[in-house]
Image: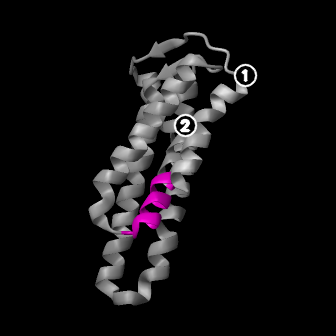
Amino acid sequence: MLLVLGAMYVLYTPLQSGFQTHIGSVHYGLTALDLSLALTNSSHVVGYGLLVLLVLRYWGDEVRFYPQALILILFFSLAVECTQLFFVEGHCRLRDILANFVGVSAALLFHYVGCCYVRSNGTAGSAFRSWLPFALQVGLGIGLNLAFKRVALAWGA
């Protein structure tokens, strides 16, 4: 199911453009402003974080799947950016990939905290493990957005 959803998402940009291609630009610079904009991009941070949590939920909520989930979601992130390069959006930004990596890393950390809580308290915390990472991921996105939005505005974004 996740593979089908991923394929649909990667095909969304070409379908939106009517498969009209043009070569966009690659933005691979990471200035202080780009870093601030990457951390402010809560849709990427939260979206890719929740996506990795869904993948882990599907695979069985085990820590041993972290490397595979990280590689899968980052590969998916690169595929989306490459698709945007050749179709409607016309840009491939390193700061978007950085925001995706921050979201995935935070989600893995939140998931690990949930797993440690369940391990220390037995099975009584399994519901806690299910909702805590999702809540923390959304909270992280809101917090980063509020914290770095002023910095980005001050630097002229």
How far across and how far down the image is residue 107, in percent?
42, 56
Residue 31 visible? The answer is: yes
**Which sits in the foreground, 85 or 95?**
85
Res 145 quadrant in image: top right
Q: Amino acid at mark 2?
A: Asn
Magenta-span inclusion, residue 51:
yes
Pick whichever, 29 or 13, lies toward us: 13
At x 36%, y 80%, the residue is 118
- State whether residue 41 is above or below residue 58: above
What residue is shown at x 54% (from left), y 26% (from top)? 83
Please name the amino acid that badge 1 sits on: Gly
Point out the stretch of residues depicted in magenta.
Answer: 50-61
Q: Quadrant location of residue 73?
A: top left
Main SS, magenta region, reads helix
Residue named by callout 1: 18
| Residue that badge 2 annotates | 41
Label 2: few (<14), some (14–19) or many (≥20) C-alpha neighbours in 10 Å: many
| Label 1 element class | loop
Q: Is residue 1 above or below residue 28?
A: below
The Cα–Cα distance between marks 1 and 2, rounded to whole angstroms, is 27 Å
Of discs 1 and 2, which sits in the foreground? Answer: 1
Instruction: Compare marks 1 and 2 and give the one earlier in the sequence.
Output: 1
Visual colour scheme: one colour
- Residue at 59% of width from left, 16% of height from top? 90
Residue 4 circle label: none
Indicate the quadrant containing the C terminus: top left, top right, bottom left or bottom right. Answer: top right
